[in-house]
Image (cartoon, rainbow, N blue to C red):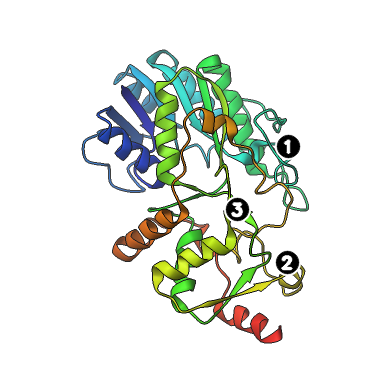
Amino acid sequence: MRILVIGGTWFLGKAIVQSALLQGHEVTTFNRGRSGADVPGVEAVHGDRTVHEDLLKLAQRGPWDAVIDTSSSELPPRDVLLTATSLARQARCWVHISTVSVYEGWPHEALAEESPLLKCPADADESFGYTGEDGSPTKYGFQKAGGERAVVQVFGDAAVFLRPGVILGPGEYIGRLPWWLERAKRGGSVLAPAPAEQRIQPVDVRDVADFALRQAAGSVSGGFNVTHPDGIAFSDFLHECLHTTGGDGTPVWVEPTVLTKHGVKQWTEMPLWRTHAGVWSVDSQRAVEAGLRCRPIAETVRDTWQWWAADGRPVDHPRWAEHGIAPEKEARILAAL
């Protein structure tokens, strides 16, 4: 296949490019050239997807069998619409990396692809939407839902939407798994969110990449929830972090009410911890039937640790500083138990 990857220089975009090249596909990437080096072997086109003239120049490099858009997270729907419209005649299908945040019920309700989406116009600007008092819905979710609507408006039944929850693995720029790895390495008593058997649904970035390429080559359209179908016990996740780093830590499982009492912020200060009923109840059976395969968490943890030890933080990202509880605060909570 001839594939255009919008983005393609870091984390998921880079993983898609690397996997595509290994499979023998011809890959073009389009980005501003600011967030990482181009992967050797691609036809790299630099430009700004919010600039119509840059998109017209890109379109001249087509046609492609598929466009895989990995770079719309920070863009309003109108810019997604501009990109899709500019490339409409140059691609057979569009694979769009979206998010579970597009659902009205996220994160309070169990979700499937049939669950209703947030409503946002395809041409909305960055001001559309709001974040609720309890943190849901989110303005981000509205914006991403509008981005999906923009792609549907242009590509119709040739549009595919991948809706991951949490993606982990080598190259992660948010810092969730790297923080847990560093915390495990430090050892001692490790503050951990009870219950230990709580199952979480992160997916490995390489598995998402392979699934995106599978959908680019296929003929099935619509949305796919890309979450771990069986889930992973938090205790197993933390055990793998301790085992991989050689840390001598001992998890101290603390009830959510106690963590909340001490002001521990869900999702950020305690990465991957969130008490909402639906956060880890996202049905991915449709994706499994379409070829999603999730590797063991031990492999994700091991490979991320190897990458982290060799290369470290990939790019500066504002969300990195949000993640992880300060050692002093953790110590105070443990001492108060």
Mark 1 is surrounded, within 10 Å at the Cα level, by few (under 14), some (14 to 19) or many (20 or more) other residues, namely many
Image location of residue 75, percent across then percent down: 53, 38
Q: Secondary structure at mark 3?
A: strand
User: Is 266 or 122 nearer to us in this picture?
Assistant: 266
Instruction: Give the residue pinned by disc 3.
Output: 200
Q: Secondary structure at mark 1?
A: loop
Going by the numbered disc 2, the residue's amino acid type is: Pro
What amino acid is found at the position of numbered circle 3 in the picture?
Ile
- Asked if residue 52 shows in the view, the reply is no
Helix, strand or loop at mark 2: helix
Q: CA distance from mark 1 to mark 3?
A: 20 Å
Q: CA distance from mark 2 to mark 1?
A: 25 Å
Residue that badge 1 annotates: 104
Considering only vertical position in the picture, is 230 above or below 63? below
Q: Quadrant of residue 264?
A: bottom right
Up/down of 127 relative to 202, above or below: above
Which amino acid type corresponds to the residue marked 1 in the rendered image? Answer: Glu
Q: Which residue is mark 2?
A: 256
Q: Indicate which disc, 2 or 1, sits on the residue closer to the N terminus.
A: 1
Instruction: Give the Cα separation between the discs numbered 3 and 2.
Output: 15 Å
